[in-house]
Amino acid sequence: METKVKLKVLRELMQQKGINAWIVPSGDPHQSEYVADHWKARAWISGFSGSAGVCVITSDKAGLWTDSRYWLQAASELEDSGIELFKMFSPGVPDYQTWLLDELSDGAVLGFDGSLLSVREVTAISKRLSSKNISLSYGEDLTGMIWQDRPAIPQEPAMMLAEEYAGESVTSKIERVRTEMQKNLVDYHVISALDEIAWLFNIRGKDVKYNPVVISNAFLSKDGVNLFVNKTKLNDELIAFMKTCGVTIFHYEDILGYLAGLEADKKVLIDPGKVSQKIKDAINCQVQEGKSIVTYLKAIKNQVEQEGIRQAHIQDGAALVSWIFWMKQQVGKIELDEYTAGEKLGEFRAEGDKFQGLSFTPIIGFRGNGAIVHYSAKPDTARKIEPGGILLVDSGGQYLNGTTDVTRTFSLGNITEEERYYFTLVLAGHIDLARAVFPKGTSGAMLDAYTRTPLWREKKNYGHGTGHGVGHFLGVHEGPQNISPKSIYPILPGSVTTDEPGMYLEGKFGIRTENILICQTLETTEYGEFCCFETVTLCPISRELINKDMLTSEQIAWLDNYHAMVFEKLSPLLEPDVTEWIRKETLPL
Amino acid sequence: METKVKLKVLRELMQQKGINAWIVPSGDPHQSEYVADHWKARAWISGFSGSAGVCVITSDKAGLWTDSRYWLQAASELEDSGIELFKMFSPGVPDYQTWLLDELSDGAVLGFDGSLLSVREVTAISKRLSSKNISLSYGEDLTGMIWQDRPAIPQEPAMMLAEEYAGESVTSKIERVRTEMQKNLVDYHVISALDEIAWLFNIRGKDVKYNPVVISNAFLSKDGVNLFVNKTKLNDELIAFMKTCGVTIFHYEDILGYLAGLEADKKVLIDPGKVSQKIKDAINCQVQEGKSIVTYLKAIKNQVEQEGIRQAHIQDGAALVSWIFWMKQQVGKIELDEYTAGEKLGEFRAEGDKFQGLSFTPIIGFRGNGAIVHYSAKPDTARKIEPGGILLVDSGGQYLNGTTDVTRTFSLGNITEEERYYFTLVLAGHIDLARAVFPKGTSGAMLDAYTRTPLWREKKNYGHGTGHGVGHFLGVHEGPQNISPKSIYPILPGSVTTDEPGMYLEGKFGIRTENILICQTLETTEYGEFCCFETVTLCPISRELINKDMLTSEQIAWLDNYHAMVFEKLSPLLEPDVTEWIRKETLPL
């Protein structure tokens, strides 16, 4: 079907159902960052294939809202579709709710699939549109009704993550969640976030690209645990194991019916940002909205997870260093572009014995493309990589023992003083965060100041956050903590966060240096518990791009120390010529 | 009447009114920091004279909750009163609401004077006690009914603050408030905060100690402005002036009746943190709770106010420097204690031709007393000041053109390396904030990190905020901005905030260095508008307490530059011997 035909069929159905406008968001029923094809309804109906965006259809108009990363792509993919492109966050461009307030008349009905929006999102929409007395209809999935050849829900086999990697038994995790449930005075807890379920049950899967999760929902009570998952995903060993943990397996689809059968006087905890409106509506007893318990437990990595993360970074660092050496050797000699270079990097990573796949689409930007923050090279439009200029590479892998995310910027020749200046400014900020000493519980906002200060002094800044939480063989982005100007959440011992300041000069180059940091307790004094960061990412930081005069002696000492660790940990895994190269790269400045 | 008798009379009245517990807070109907004697009901009923605390009386028990500053004093003042002291924030000590939940039975009635608690406070109490079905009764002031010889509401004359000091006309300020009211879609706005009213009407008064305000309420509509104030406070000139500004004067007591007469379909904006529950209850139309508009306008000082603040600091600095010199000359020669030294400092300040009084009770702590953060010397218990040891002095004045607040720590001989070490750590943090460069709108929390970093690196910290907003010939503490680990409010150009890190070694000494900073725009680049701080406080920072090796060259350069400015601005006002002294004190390090 063409987009125009799809819209026509949808509009007929909307009219039949008495719905005046229909929203098709990008999400899935688990509020996932990466979505299985089965839920790519927005891409299907609009023809726009980017990962972020929302499509809204009224009886005579249709709009697609997406951010600047996708404007070119969306304009091309929406051509002749009858869908207008709205450039999100552009001055004068209304957001879709403002647009709906204009388009819909008083008393209109707005519809969407209630499983695709979180309770928080639906509450916000409802509040926003209340001034016009607009009612919401989200019981039925109209898009699904007309979607022929819709891909099935993924049915990839799940695997057990052994305790030698997870570091804590399922039984112990369940007990800890129950303790928090008691503190929250709730009887039940529904969990929809796939990474939370994977952590709680020590399972991993392949249902979703980049995130090793199993599509499912979980339900905990004081004495029972139910996992709602397609049983074909679980082998006999896993089923037996779940039984020993007291976990009852239900069909994935059974969750709604199960929730409808709860005793009316009980209380269920749900996280409004992580559970769909459809789940909430199915609950037939009291609902208490609150923070998801697993988010906070999962964020603090145990000693086994931490050691796994260190080990994963040795494999990952060896692959990245080998690739950088290879790139420096091959540039100008063979045909290379941003896309093929990324494929080659993937091959190096795949050599690791614990490698399980990439943790996200690599961002490889040469010269001016490095300045496009969310750039992702496509095979047909990737830029040729030639001698001269700098290359920004942001990439990561999934390993049985951890998740990596690392950015390096390195030169392919002809370094300019301007590049050195910006590279060193960014590095100074990176180091000041990495070597910070701070009281336990210091907020991400306060720590963000460390990274930006060298740039601020030069009246410069970068437009993104400084760091995000990272999972343990799970999502490369996870909460609750992050390091950014607005982050009030405390940074706690055992949490894992990136340190990735950058500078982007449009049309010229992009610079970013990213390592993963584990927060560790340093010392407890009469003034409280003080923390520091342990850097686990292992890859030399391009010395040829450093202007040593711009660094303090403390910053230089940190870098020399870091480089010594990189050499010590990586050299045993490297080919002799690579070892020889990083020996020079990691000498004291 | 003795406390016991007062409690007996109150309990009889409570029984008569069907009230099971009665709260007597410390506040006034304007949520003031400093309270006129008329509203010192808590001090009257309990006998505890400290500035902070709350008294709760049930039919058979009575408790007083206050923080650690007042535990000794309260224990002594409450002796034989029948009131139990609860040490607020001590481990295991319930707050008064938790205590009430224990003491009151289901369905009990809790009473208090609704004019003394803000809407926000009453909402919190109500929410907290809802689990026990406790209802609130706050229409009558039982304490007032039994309070014989209650001091009258102050009737001090008000004065007009000329535009040469205020920098903006009343008409212009009213228009700006109205513009914001329109944006908030409200018809009316009630203002109860006395400093907000003083700012809006360019009036000052003497009703309250330390805060030059006039007890009153204000009401704005689209075309009218009412000031509810005792008319005897206004001279003919002020009455005439108010008339030209379109301001109608009502009696102070008329506000409740006036609000009761508003048209039911109109909407009134009130700040729930600044308006009393009694005011809210009187409003006979829709209430919209939101941030007080004047708070935000008042925080950004205009050019005239800023220049006035600079000038006020010259007078204030000259007084403080002259006093420090005098102290250093006299110590060991004449009888001196923390209290008499403070009196003498007040005499030096009073010589300024624009001086209007102190801005708060000076904190003068010698040796170990300097480590008591909120220490205030009393005539009978003040410590003798002798040669040897360091003195912490935190003080400030009100001037027609500005408010000051400055802390210096200086030596009276026998300096130890330990004192130098802590003094320099604190100074390094002070300087790093003073010389910060940051994007407009950076939060107070991010800036707080600057001051603490040198201390954190040594695994040390201080337990108070780094800085508070300061008024222009108004409250020495004002919002909305502050610099502290939890402050998400942005620091904006024109705002005035203190920079006052410290270190406190129990029983040994306290150190704090405090200057007032005005946020200024530095430069707008492609990365946005960048700001810096202008330091306006003028007083040398004790060079004898500095360990120069602990400062960076940038910190030393800042200090040398600051000292040069101090000498240049103060020396014309000083006696020759003082000038000669500060010439040496302000030489480059």
Image (cartoon, coloured by chain):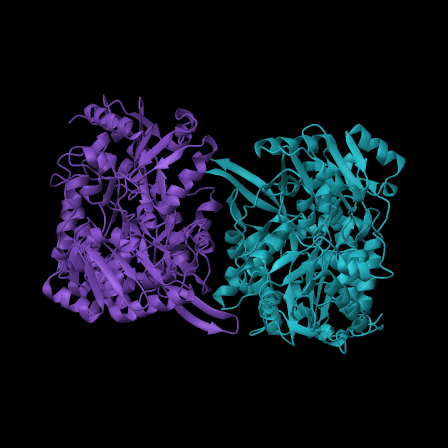
Chain colours: A cyan, B purple
Quarter-of-image position of residue A182: top right
**B113 relative to B91 in the view: left or right:** left
Q: Residue at x 70, y 60 (%)?
A: A25
Q: Is residue A377 left or right of residue A288?
A: right
| Residue farthest toward the bottom in the current orientation of the protein | A80
User: Does residue B554 show up?
Assistant: yes
- Residue A262 position by quadrant: top right
Instruction: Please state which of residues A163 and B264 is positioned toward the viewer in this rendering.
Output: B264
What residue sits 48% from the left and 33% below the top?
Answer: B131
Image quadrant where one finds the N terminus of chain B: top left
Of A317 and A477, nearer the camera is: A477
Residue B171, percent from left and from top: 26, 70
Residue at x-position 26% and y-position 28%: B16
Q: Judge whether A499 appears above or below A343 on screen.
A: above
Q: Is residue A43 above or below residue A185?
A: below
The answer, for residue A575, to whether it is visible in the render is: no
Q: Relative to A398, is B99 on the left or the right? A: left
* Image coords of residue A313 (percent x, y): 73, 49
Q: Position of residue B418 (x, y in %)?
A: 36, 40
- Tell which of B375 and A476 is nearer to you: A476
Where residue B417 appears, as percent x and y from the top left, is 35, 42
Q: Give B456 or A143, whichever is nearer the viewer.
A: A143
